[in-house]
Amino acid sequence: MNLNGTTKLGVLFLGRERPGFDVQWGSEMERRVEEFLGTSPYETVSQKAVNNSSLREALALYREEGCDALVVLQPTMSDGRLAPILAQQWGSPLILWATPERPEGPRISSNSLVGTHIFASTLRQLRRPFEIVYGDPSETRVRDELYEAVQVSIVARYLKHTKLGLVGYHAPGFIDMHADPFDLNSALGVQMHHFGLQELLDSSRALSEEAVREDVAKVLGMGLPFEDITAEDLPTNSRLYLAMRQMIEEESLDALAIREWPELPNIIGQWPYLAIVRLTMEVCPTAMEGDVDGAISCLVGQMLGLGPAYLSDWLEHDRETITLWHMGNAPLEMCEPTGSQYGPRLAKHFNIPKPIVVNANLKADQPVTLFRLWRCDGRYLMMAHDAETEAPKRHLMGTNGLVRIKNRDVYEWFDELCHAGMPHHVAVFRGHHQKLLRRFARQANVERVDGVTHAPASS
């Protein structure tokens, strides 16, 4: 799913058949909005509507033009009866932008915020997602709010057109990661296609020696030090990488989850973690242990422009910090520099000593966000929390990281997340994106777990 092209934005100015309030001020605000949008990264299609018929005509044009998102403004208060029509006729999330009152004079000039409030309340009771922006387009805050609103609205819409592949099943005993294709499609709109592990292995064996040699040369060109492996270990991993990449491209997959444990090291004598790192960085999010919802968590962040994620175990914690660890699958840009003491190294698995994993520490003193989507009690839930990385307290083989959580007791938070059914993997993104991800949750109709006490499971 390519979201890197130009965004086409529908801009709808609503009014009334009988003009009211300060029409001149309304025109001034409309001019300011258009002027700002002319300098924005969006391609815009602007229309005005004052009644049922003109609203339907405008929406038909937006559909014809292929608009990715719709911004609705009331420079002066419009007719509240248009809200349910808007909800019925436009199936994607809406962005409601309320503009300010004239700052001088004794009379109300626009009532824009009140009109927008009416629309928001109506849409909520119709169970239609929307975003709110309020203020003058000259304000940096307002522009940032608009950009975020457009971003989450588009991703919530396009997530419904994504396709995920699952190779095999979830890892033994990881029942909490079981994914139902019908629930997944009903809740998020994502299609899940199932592939057998044997299909992947057959594809890997059918690759030409020349293709494998070329890929091995690419891996050697990455300059990653060898810890306890040799170059002779690379061809098998290249076959896995090329076979998974071929599957992703031929099946038009936006994300992939694979059950690598326990079969792959036993069948082919290798782990696929180097291949997973490369695919995550280059093609699409690729999750281990059959973690479908984990792969979708990484996909959502990538679609929002947060970059590739590291899917990690929540290994241990104290009141303020969490140790993040997994068996060598973090994107290289999230790790300490290559060549440094704890930079990426190609190695064998510490527990089942077969190649190839990528041992590395996460970069210290960096802002990150912990994020997870999961299904429990027949609905999708979400957590997102900003954190800061620190140097780990001890050396661990694999991907090793420590994050500090502010303004929250981690013991209590972990207890809450367990009672909400969250699986043991969390997606880690560079930067602080808690606010953006929580806005996304509203658009995707996902319930946030933010400190609200959940009722205990019924006996």
Image: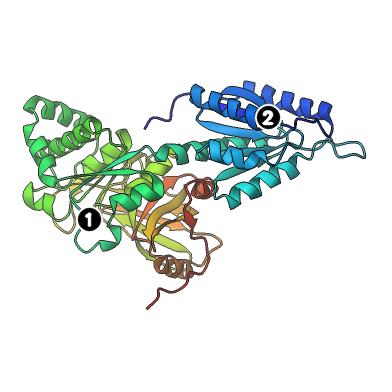
Label located before the other in sequence (2 or 1): 2
Which residue corresponds to the image point at 25% horizontal and 55% vertical from the top-left? Answer: 397
Q: Amino acid at mark 2?
A: Phe
The residue wearing badge 1 is 170
Q: Amino acid at mark 1?
A: His
Q: Nearer the viewer, residue 238 or 320?
A: 238
Which residue corresponds to the image point at 7% horizontal and 27% vertical from the top-left? Answer: 208
Q: Residue 13's mark? A: 2
Q: Position of residue 114 (x, y in %)?
A: 75, 45
Which residue corresponds to the image point at 23% horizontal and 29% vertical from the top-left? Answer: 221
Indicate whether 78 appears above or below 429: above
Q: Secondary structure at mark 2?
A: strand
Which residue, as the protein is rendered here, is positioned at the far bottom? 459
Which residue corresponds to the image point at 69% horizontal and 22% vertical from the top-left? Answer: 35
Position of the N terminus, as image quadrant, is: top left
Q: Please tell me in which quadrant of the rendered image residue 195 appears.
A: top left
Position of 346 compared to 18: left or right?
left
Q: Nearer the viewer, residue 166 or 57?
A: 57
Q: Please tell me in which quadrant of the rendered image residue 262 appears.
A: bottom left
